[in-house]
Amino acid sequence: MIQNCIATLQENLLHFLPASNTDTLVTELNPQQQQAILHVEGPLLVLAGAGSGKTRVVTHRIAHLLDLGIAPSDILAVTFTNKAAEEMRTRIRVLKNAQVLACTFHSLGARILRESIASLGYHPDFTIYDEEDSEKLLKTCLEQLQLGGEKTVLRQVRSQISMAKNDLLGPEEIKNDPIAKETYALYQMKLKECNALDFDDLLYLTVRLLREDAKTREEYQNRWLFVLIDEYQDTNLAQYTIAKTLVEKHHNIFAVGDPDQSIYSWRGARYQNILNFESDFSGAKVITLDQNYRSTNQILQAANALIQHNTARYDKKLWSRLGQGEKPLLFTGHNERQEAEFVADRIRRHIQNDSLIYNDIAIFYRTNAQSRPFEDLLIARKIPYAIIGGISFYDRREVKDALAWLRLAVSNSDLISFLRTVNLPRRGIGASTLDKIVLAAGERKMPILDFCEELLMNPAICLDVKLGIKQREGLRDYLRIVNRLRARKTELKIHELIAEALAESKYLSYIQEDPETVQDRKENLDELMGKAAEWEELQESPSLPRFLEELSLRSQVSQDPSLPCVKLMTLHNSKGLEFPLVFLVGLEEDLFPHINTKEDPKALEEERRLCYVGITRAKKFLYLTSTIYRYMWGTARLMRPSRFLKEIPEQLLSKTSQKHYS
């Protein structure tokens, strides 16, 4: 009945609407875009290739519905970030001066639950716990169950509960992990007692509500007669289920996305949702937007050739009216320093010859640790830069921890390094005890480490500092590590001394407490050892004090992304961005594709999609770089070019010689 009314309304209104309304909306749109925005009823999937103007299509489609007389309150647009939702709302106001509900999935869930959560036994004024609040409550649950509150267990259980909720599994459906099952059940009970929801509940409980309460489900199905979903390839099971349930009656779903740009499986995204659209919604139409408005054709040809090697996709070939442009250029350096020198030289060349500014340039890499050689060279060349979505290499916690151990090997009075490392790992020496130790050492004008040695040998020297047995043993072990590093600093190379510090302090076991960050932190430590090894090779008289001095005196040219600067970021952070000049670096096997994906065909396809995303960020100039040798896992390794380079035909790439960068 709803569909018949809409059809009649559309037919009547098209006779009376001023022609300029529709004409204005479709002006300068290509035929596929026009077809998408003029679609009214029934399921439609818009395969929006990179740079194909999908946001314009979504907003113009909403504007067209408003022109047809559809009430703004009948339209729902859902996207993945608050920024994207705000941009959508702004564009609609500019086009039609109308207020349409454009929001994220989580804010949609919060809205539905505020109105209707009573049927699940909660009060509508529920609190939404942030991550810190959720972890505190979860820690209480673990302690109540006598499972301990260690960070390792806490983070693992937190991750398991989050994954279960996104997969729409209740506590009773956890089969193979009794600890997670019991903790999940108690955690949900306590959340309800507090009339609180965690972030994942905004989706999980919304699905429960829509499934279990037929009256509520029908109310929301009748409220929004037209539902638009952006970035459909990034939906997880909960988000997909919400969208599918809301359109169950009228099937007016307008989904926009690109399976070739699905790169977030580690967040729960299921690219299968977009591939299954036609089977999920009978009679669905599919429109492909393959005209790219961002890049020149030779960049797009390389991207097309690469992504053709994936099997889980809709076939499409991006093209552009922006001309052929220059071929992507492939450079192979001897090592990562030579790779960074090449990048810095090309940045200077393009700034001078092509009227580019620093904001036009980006360097993409697979892992955060790869930023280090580029930061070093950009600083040396006085090229301003900023890390996007992360922090500078030498400001990362694990790097600062390792350097603090080295400083203690040089100085027995480095108070800051002492305070940074004395509880790595925890030795039971609390803040108040440390304050007393520092105060007493200052009063006696003794270097902090000398005072600690004296305190262990003669506790009577300071009656204000009372150490328990565990604290004494902890401090004794700590001083043993420092003394060992001091004894070996002249016989070991600097990178070997870093490895010694990590091993003696059991630091690698310590960082296991946070399983979500442990991989990145290990890679950063490995990169620090690589930096030390590289530095020693380049110095006539290398020494630990000189190495530490050089790192301490580094002056960062720019770390404010609002100022003109080159942008450095991981490929995951590049999604949604574009730059006239892009360097995609580190294209070697085990680095990109990442070593953790090499045995999993699905994971390899996602790595290829990630490479495709990186390539399609480039507007005019694209460089693909790799090295012959790279310092990895404690040694200089012979690297193999990434399979992705081999999957792009040679005739689509230019090559430059490395001899000028020897």
Image: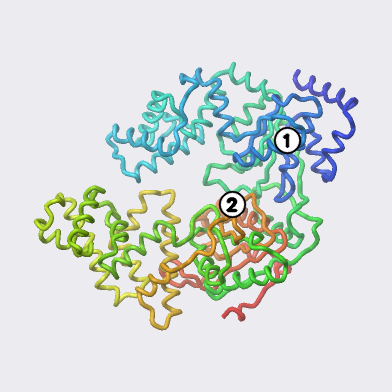
Residue type indicated by callout 1: Ile
Closer to the camera, 343 or 298? 343
Residue drawn at 51 percent across, 36 percent down: 166
Q: Residue 14, how many percent across, how many down?
A: 87, 27
Tell me if residue 629 comes above or below residue 430 in the rendering.
Answer: below
Residue drawn at 47 percent across, 31 percent down: 128
Residue type indicated by callout 2: Glu
Tag 2 residue: 606
Tag 1 residue: 92
Residue at the farthest top position: 215
Q: Residue 282, how many percent across, how many down?
A: 72, 31
Label 2 Cα neighbours within 10 Å, binned few <14 / some 14-19 / many ≥20: many
Tell me if residue 549 comes above or below residue 99 in the rendering.
Answer: below
Residue drawn at 88 percent across, 35 percent down: 20
Task: Tell me which colouring the rendered structure shows.
Answer: rainbow
- Report if residue 480 is visible in the image: no
Closer to the camera, 399 or 548? 548
Kind of element beneath mark 2: helix
Quadrant where the image shows the C terminus: bottom right
Q: Residue 279, how many percent across, how many down?
A: 68, 35
Q: In this view, does 31 lie to the left or right of 248?
A: right
- Report if residue 316 is visible in the image: yes
Q: Tags 1 and 2 in contact by the CB under 8 Å rule?
A: no
Q: Residue 24, how many percent across, how many down?
A: 85, 38
Tell me if residue 415 comes above or below residue 38 in the rendering.
Answer: below
Q: Which mark, by number, is residue 514?
A: none
Q: Which quarter of the picture shows residue 532?
A: bottom left
